[in-house]
Image (spheres, coloured by chain):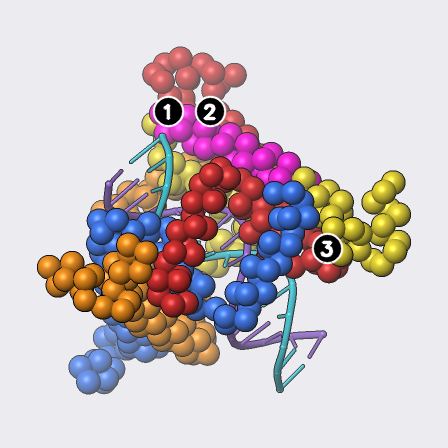
Chain colours: A yellow, B red, C blue, D orange, E cyan, F purple
DNA sequence: ACACAAAGTTCGCGTC
DNA sequence: GACGCGAACTTTGTGT
């Protein structure tokens, strides 16, 4: 109420010419989303711990997941190029 | 089937001595969580766009949110120290 | 010098249609630059350790340095805006 | 030594109980080192641009350089593991 | 294991 | 409209 009223006055509301309610709304939403995001990050981390304790190499698993996100053709090409360069350099 | 059988053999399953099902399970969970995380990131980005189009300075809003995450006492102390240093340096 | 010589020798100058010498040159330069960069990073870190042991708050010093990089007018504006938003929100 | 002396000497040596000169010294050194570091970063970026314009794939070159930093045995092991996992998963 | 620092990747912006 | 530039976010590595 009070918000939408004041908004119509200018394009902003009250305190110091700031659309406070709107800002507060934005911030609240962002903070909530960030919390959820953080929680997901923690979950992922937990799974990696579990992976590690199962004896898998987490670094390799991370790369594996990365590769799965990419177009297989691109992966193929990248790896071929890498081999080419390495052999060319003698590495 | 074949997987759970082989699992019981050692602590790993079949292909090349790898607990494939377990790995597959981990990866699936991670990929799903990462997707959700990504979606939240997109939501947050959208809100910042809205914030910007409302005339707020997103950079400042980001800092504001950062500060709100911190203990007010710590914020106070940090800012006081910063002022002290700045004045001492003549900045 | 030594590199351009190897081009004429020939066993590695053009493996699989790749300008190997050129690539080798690029890589060598990059690796060297990265080493120098890393060394500078270590130096900086050392100074921060010293700062810490002198009793300064390194986090605050970092922010101070950040602020010094910015245009003073922008800093001023940012801080003014931040205050405005904070007061508006009651923070 | 010299520092605690300067505290008593001068006009800016000890503002508000702060070892200003010392702080100023630290900051100056850090800022200078950071500039050099930044310059190196720019140099590296230039080389990558050159690499790109020569027709090499910069992403692959970056990875190549990364691999060269690692112990060859570790690289070997990582790649072997990656293959194992991929085949196990059918990827 | 946590926090800090570095690197890589992505996105928005100004330019041409 | 694309391209390069710069900043921001994310992720990876490291030292405590």
Q: How far apart are marks 1 and 2 (CA)?
A: 9 Å
Q: Which of F2 and D21 is in front in this view?
A: D21
Number of other residues with Cα within 10 Å of mark 3, as a class: few under 14, some 14 to 19, many 20 or more: few
- Left or right of A58? Residue B28 is right
Q: Which of marks 2 and 3 is in front?
A: 3
Task: Estimate the x, y position of residue A80 in percent, counting from the top left.
Answer: 42, 59
- Left or right of C53? Residue B39 is right
List the residue tagged with mark 3.
Answer: A16
User: From what the image shows, is residue B34 above or below residue A81?
Assistant: above
Say which residue appears at 60% left-offset and 54% top-offset: C83
Q: Which of marks 1 and 3 is nearer the N terminus?
A: 3
Q: Which of marks 1 and 2 is in front?
A: 1
Tell me which corner region of the image, top left, top right, bottom left or bottom right, holds residue D31.
bottom left
Q: Which of B8 and D40 is in front in this view?
A: D40
Which chain is indicated by disc 3?
A
Tell me the element at label 1: loop
Task: Estimate the x, y position of residue D80 in percent, counting from the top left.
Answer: 33, 42
List the residue tagged with mark 1.
Answer: A54
Residue B22: mark? 2
**Labels 1 and 3 within one chain:** yes
Q: Which of D33 and A57 is in front in this view?
A: D33
Q: Give the range drawn in magenta.
A: A29-53
- Asked if the magenta segment contains residue D64, the reply would be no
Say which residue appears at 38% left-offset and 40% top-offset: A60
Say which residue appears at 54% left-offset and 36% top-offset: A38
Q: How far apart are marks 2 and 3 (CA)?
A: 58 Å
Say which residue appears at 47% left-offset and 44% top-offset: B75
User: From what the image shows, is residue C18 above or below residue B78?
Assistant: below
Query: Answer yes or no: do the residues labelled 1 and 2 have beta carbons within 8 Å?
Result: yes
Tell me the element at label 2: helix
Most common SS among magenta residues = helix
Tell me the element at label 3: helix
């Amino acid at each position: 109420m009070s918000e939408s009223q004041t908004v119509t006055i200018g394009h902003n509301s009250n305190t110091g010419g700031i659309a406070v309610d709107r800002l507060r709304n934005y911030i609240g939403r962002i903070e909530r989303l960030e919390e959820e995001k953080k929680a997901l990050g923690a979950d992922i981390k937990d799974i990696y711990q579990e992976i590690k304790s199962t004896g898998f190499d987490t670094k390799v698993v991370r790369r594996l997941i990365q590769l799965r996100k990419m177009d297989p053709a691109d992966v193929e090409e990248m790896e071929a190029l890498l081999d080419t360069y390495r052999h060319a350099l003698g590495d």
